[in-house]
Amino acid sequence: MATSGTATFESGFYIDDIITEAYERLGRFDYSGNDIKTARRSLNIMFQEWGNRGLHFWEVKNNSITLVSGQSAYTMYRSTADGTSDATAVYGVDDVLEAVYRNSSGVDFPLTKINRSAYQGLSNKTQSGVPTQYFVQRFIDRITITLYLTPGSTEAGNLLNYYYVSRIQDAGAYGNNADVPYRFVPCMVSGLAYYLSQKFKPELTQQMKLFYEDELQRALEEDGSSSSSFITPKNYYPNV
């Protein structure tokens, strides 16, 4: 029996195909240009809502910042549309997951992530030396990462290497592919059908929501990277 020999369906599944499939699930086979426009808007809103669903591992990326003597705070941006002229800026950052201080020999020293209250409690925030902790602030248009200790002249030129969560890219042109892996194609279509049902088929909204939540949950459970787990029993010697 002949097979296609390919496994690239999602790479040829364009935004307009996603919209068509979602409308067909609602029994709509004829729609206007405005219907397509509102569907794309709903798809972008759904991608933003996915940001509240937990970590999406395909959007985890790595980057390094060159440290500057006397500078403790460094800025990344959520969007390329903020108008900044900073040529060294990193765009699309939604949160910083973990970070290390990397010296000139390429040796990494893990940094501890602290919250705002812990950072506020530090008595001398300008003290210089090898960074040991970092504090992340998430604003509307940017993310800042503040180091403690503040890099001094000895640390200048070394790197802050970090893993960050990038935002899911907008749908954009109708001929684009969606910025999601193949595992999320089913729940993406179901989700768009659910969003569109609220506008055009409210009697199907509850049904579409059940399909969507079920497929999204399976995709989220499959997402990630498996690793080995080791369980060691604790020895207990009662006093006798």
Image (spheres, rainbow, N blue to C red):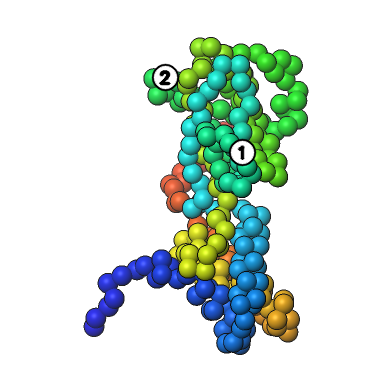
Secondary structure of the residue carrying tag 2 is loop
| Quarter holding residue 240 | top right
Pick the front one: 27 or 118: 27
Residue 42's x, y, as percent?
65, 68
Q: For the point 47% across and 64% down, which residue is it?
A: 177
Crowding near the residue tagged with mark 1, few <14, some 14–19, many ≥20 C-alpha atoms within 10 Å: few
Report the Cα–Cα distance between label 1 and label 2. Answer: 30 Å
Residue 232's x, y, as percent?
49, 41
Which amino acid, by three-letter code, is at mark 2?
Answer: Ser
- Which of the numbered marks, if any, corresponds to residue 104? 2
Which amino acid, by three-letter code, is at mark 1?
Answer: Thr
Q: For the point 57% across and 87% down, which residue is it?
A: 29
Secondary structure of the residue carrying tag 1 is loop
Residue 11's x, y, as percent?
41, 66
Please tell me whether residue 194 is drawn above or below residue 110 in the rendered image: below
Choose the circle earlier in sequence order: 1 or 2.
1
Q: Nearer the viewer, mark 1 or mark 2?
A: 1
Res 71 visible: yes
- Which of the numbered marks, if any, corresponds to residue 84? 1
